[in-house]
């Protein structure tokens, strides 16, 4: 193992882990904001109970998302110093904006929301969760703008006589077509995760006939959110696929393991092939679908891996510009497959709970709970696909991953950090998961519990505190 | 003044803000096992920093982001060079960051005692290591012509670096004790006050020696002034703490921390990361900074949004300005419990 391999593993593990917590933070912040808004408008105590209940899940999840995000901010410099030096003036700009515009907003207003229940007027207190929620979504936009620049660099020039790049237009960077497609995709996928969490939690209670008044309503919210988010993720993902076809043709070809340029290209749902993915043994195929995805035309031309490779050899010099094909092939399918399955199950669930029915079948609740990993796996696969599909580049066409790694860092240092992060993160996941399950099983708090705003208690206690 | 120097000053301000703000919440974490005699008191201490610690930490993230954008070479050399110390700081901040949230969720004395230990270690380690890191930056570390750090972890553990670490550790602890005096009442407040006086006996001489040594070998006239004012503010703050003037004491240590950071950055300029191998290899505001366009863009972003951030962060301190008493701490509800036990009366404990 070299410093490069170890650093890639570390970046992959820490980033995938970080993103386990991010979708729920983005989605649940907005859902809790909506629940609290409905409570203020309708004065229905069920919404207050839901606000507090999901608010706590949100906070446990938020804490882990925040602390793992600290590592993200520093590991570019620690492990990828050559990359940082090369692109810092471009890539660092949206990162600094994220900290100044979004991180301060999230952290300050979350603090005000947690501790401000009895110190702020109900409306002002409601504004706190909205501002925190907007902060989390803004944060996603800036980091995706940075990532999109790596996928599809815009608004820069290469400084003549050096190998450095220089930002020439921040506007181009922030309106990169890639981020304008990626941000909605990530945003909606976040709600896919959020919806699945709400469904699973509600199903656990409904299956035990506990707090049916609260969780009967919550499960409907979860199902609607999941179905809508599933459709929206598919639509935005579809737009991304066509951008990818023109901006990163190798990634598109690698998503299908299409070796030779083809008109009317089919899409395989499942393939058994050789280990490196270059030979197909058996597959189930949908005719024309790949051409349709990539070009909106059933007879459109989709470039093959070998053809793109030849073009890149001519453009960037001899070398290998293929990502690891089985990884891109399977991660792409699993992303779309898990995501679609979650949305389909939500549609089925909506039918079974129509007109506020509470299904009696044990199977309904089993499926609702066991479907929880689906959107998590879909979002994880999505990131693995988009990042592995960009290889061998860190910045497409400009800088390879091998050129990006830190020069002065030793193998032993990275082994230490990789081990420490992996163990620490596993521990955090176990504890956060256990605390969440414990909180879920305790159920939604009573409406008088903790006294929300508007209570008549003389010295009201905070609703949340440490 | 060119834009690179403007950004150097801005980053100095971010670190000053970070030390001044997170300084006291590190201090509260360090004092948690010392001053908190029972769970209610320890919860009171945690809740005193509860609404603000996360926002305080963003000053660090913003300093990191600003360095990345404005001085990519500095960011790259410093963070890859200080790999292992930074790893320790990150682990400490991660553990500390989840502690507050996780600790409150289970009402078992053993669970809470473990998290209390983690809060202590997660606060004390960064408090020590930031000082070690900054002292070494001012002193200069081995950096080669390719701007790569060539030392190791032991290189940083020299007497001056360790002195710097003890200075931040003791100053943050003092700052935290004074903050607790400002935010609590009764017995805990009295204990925090006497702790502040005792810590000051250690912190004042350490800081004075460190500033004197720093100015003797790296100083310039302008920073002699900031260092002197920092020292006077510290002595004044300690005197105010002794007389129970908590507001003045806190102002004193806040000014000390801000001016101490200003002194270190002032001594550095125009270097940002001096090389002890050869002065020719040092990173400077000019050779480490981003091109003009990026600095212009980031300057506008900073000029527009920094006042807004300062505005709402100050407002949040205003909202939570009241002293906390144990009646502010709600009784713990066990997951299986009935829920509505009355709050413990103030000061009433065995």
Image: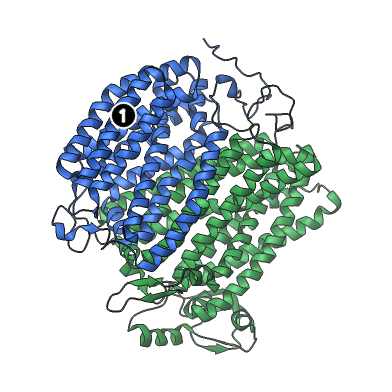
Chain colours: A green, B blue
Can you give x and y, in whole percent of width and height, for residue B213 in the image?
A: 17, 37
Front residue of A366/B334: it is B334
As drawn, is A344 to the left or to the right of A393?
right
| Residue B144 % position (x, y) | 17, 59
Name the foreground residue: A368 vs A273.
A368
| Residue wearing tag 1 | B234
| Extreme residue in the right direction | A355
Give the quadrant of the N terminus of chain A: bottom left
> On screen, B320 above or below B80?
above
Question: How many numbered discs, if any?
Answer: 1
Q: Nearer the viewer, residue B308 or A218?
A: B308
Q: Is residue A408 above or below residue B108?
A: below
Residue A178: percent from left, percent from top: 53, 71
Image mark 1: chain: B
Could you classify mark 1 by the number of other residues whose Cα lies within 10 Å: few (under 14), some (14-19), or many (20 or more)? many
Seen as rendered, the residue at the extreme top is B350
Image quadrant containing the C terminus of chain A:
top right
Q: Residue furthest left?
A: B278
> From where the camera sits, is residue A363 visible?
no
Tell me what residue is drawn at x 81 percent, y 57 percent.
A351
Residue under the image location 33 percent in, 66 percent down? A404
Give left or right: position of A297 versus B281. right
For residue A55, side relative to residue A262 (left or right)? right
Q: Residue B345 is drawn in which quadrant? A: top right
């Amino acid at each position: 193992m070299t410093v490069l391999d170890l650093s890639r593993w570390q970046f992959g593990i820490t980033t995938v882990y970080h993103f386990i917590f991010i979708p729920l933070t983005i989605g649940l912040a907005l859902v809790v904001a909506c629940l609290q808004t409905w409570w203020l408008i309708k004065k229905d105590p069920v919404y207050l109970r839901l606000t507090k209940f999901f608010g706590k899940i949100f906070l446990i999840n938020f804490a882990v998302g925040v602390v793992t995000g600290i590592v993200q901010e520093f590991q570019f410099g620690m492990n990828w110093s050559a990359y940082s030096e090369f692109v810092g003036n471009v890539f660092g700009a949206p990162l600094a904006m994220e900290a100044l515009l979004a991180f301060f907003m999230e952290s300050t207003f979350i603090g005000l929301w947690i501790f401000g229940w009895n110190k702020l007027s109900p409306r002002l207190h409601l504004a706190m969760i909205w501002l925190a929620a907007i902060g989390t979504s803004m944060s996603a936009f800036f980091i995706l703008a940075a990532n999109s620049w790596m996928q599809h660099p815009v608004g820069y020039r290469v400084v003549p006589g050096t190998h450095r790049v220089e930002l020439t237009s921040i506007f181009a960077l922030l309106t990169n077509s890639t981020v304008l497609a990626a941000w909605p995709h990530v945003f909606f996928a976040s709600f896919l995760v959020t919806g699945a969490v709400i469904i699973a939690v509600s199903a656990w209670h409904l299956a035990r006939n506990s707090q049916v008044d609260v969780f009967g309503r919550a499960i409907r919210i979860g199902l609607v959110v999941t179905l809508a988010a599933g459709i929206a993720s598919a639509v935005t993902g579809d737009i991304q696929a066509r951008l990818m076809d023109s901006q990163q043709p190798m990634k598109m070809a690698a998503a299908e393991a299409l070796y030779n340029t083809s008109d009317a290209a089919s899409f395989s749902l499942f393939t058994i092939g050789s280990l490196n993915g270059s030979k197909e043994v058996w597959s189930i195929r949908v005719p024309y679908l790949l051409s349709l995805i990539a070009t909106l035309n059933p007879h459109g031309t989709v470039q093959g891996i070998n053809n793109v490779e030849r073009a890149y050899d001519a453009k960037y010099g001899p070398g290998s510009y293929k990502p690891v094909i089985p990884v891109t092939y399977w991660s792409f399918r699993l992303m779309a497959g898990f995501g679609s399955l979650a949305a389909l199950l939500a549609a089925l669930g909506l039918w079974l709970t129509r007109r506020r029915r509470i299904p009696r079948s044990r199977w309904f609740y089993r499926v609702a709970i066991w479907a929880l990993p689906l959107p998590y796996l879909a979002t994880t696969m999505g990131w693995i696909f988009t990042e592995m599909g960009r290889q061998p580049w860190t910045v497409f066409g400009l800088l390879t991953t091998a050129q990006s790694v830190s020069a002065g860092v030793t193998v032993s240092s990275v082994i230490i950090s990789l081990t420490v992060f992996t163990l620490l993160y596993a521990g955090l996941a176990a504890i956060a998961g256990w605390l969440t399950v414990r909180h879920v099983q305790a159920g939604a708090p009573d409406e008088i519990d903790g006294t929300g705003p508007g209570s008549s208690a003389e010295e009201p206690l905070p609703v949340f505190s440490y | 003044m060119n834009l690179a120097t403007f950004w150097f000053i801005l980053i100095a301000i971010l670190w000053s803000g970070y030390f001044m703000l997170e300084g006291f919440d590190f201090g509260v974490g360090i004092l948690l096992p010392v001053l908190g005699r029972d769970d209610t008191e320890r919860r009171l201490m945690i809740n005193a920093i509860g609404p603000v610690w996360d926002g305080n930490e963003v000053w660090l993230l913003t300093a990191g982001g600003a360095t990345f954008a404005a001085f990519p070479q500095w960011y790259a050399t410093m963070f890859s060079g200080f790999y292992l110390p930074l790893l320790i700081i990150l682990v400490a901040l991660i553990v500390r960051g989840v502690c507050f949230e996780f600790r409150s969720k289970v009402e078992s004395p053993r669970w809470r005692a473990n998290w209390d230990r983690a809060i202590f270690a997660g606060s004390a380690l960064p408090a020590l290591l930031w000082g070690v890191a900054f002292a070494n930056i001012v002193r200069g570390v081995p950096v080669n012509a390719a701007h790569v750090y060539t030392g190791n972890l032991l290189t940083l553990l020299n007497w001056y670096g360790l002195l710097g670490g003890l200075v931040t550790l003791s100053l943050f602890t003092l700052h935290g004790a004074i903050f607790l005096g400002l935010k609590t009442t009764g017995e805990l407040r009295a204990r925090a006050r006497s702790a502040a006086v005792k810590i000051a006996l250690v912190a004042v001489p350490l800081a004075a020696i460190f500033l004197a040594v720093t100015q003797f070998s790296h100083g310039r006239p302008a920073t002699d002034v900031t260092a002197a004012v920092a020292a006077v503010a510290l002595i004044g703050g300690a005197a105010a703490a002794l007389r129970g003037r908590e507001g003045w004491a806190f102002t004193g240590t806040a000014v000390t921390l801000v001016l101490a950071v200003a002194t270190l950055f002032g001594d550095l300029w125009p270097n940002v990361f001096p090389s002890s191998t050869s002065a020719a290899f040092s990173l400077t505001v000019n050779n480490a900074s981003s091109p003009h366009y990026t600095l212009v863009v980031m300057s506008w972003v900073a000029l527009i949004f920094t006042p807004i951030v300062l505005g709402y962060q100050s407002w949040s301190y205003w909202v939570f300005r009241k002293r906390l008493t144990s009646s502010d701490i709600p009784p713990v509800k066990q997951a299986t419990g009935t829920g509505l036990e009355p709050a413990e009366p103030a000061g009433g404990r065995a």
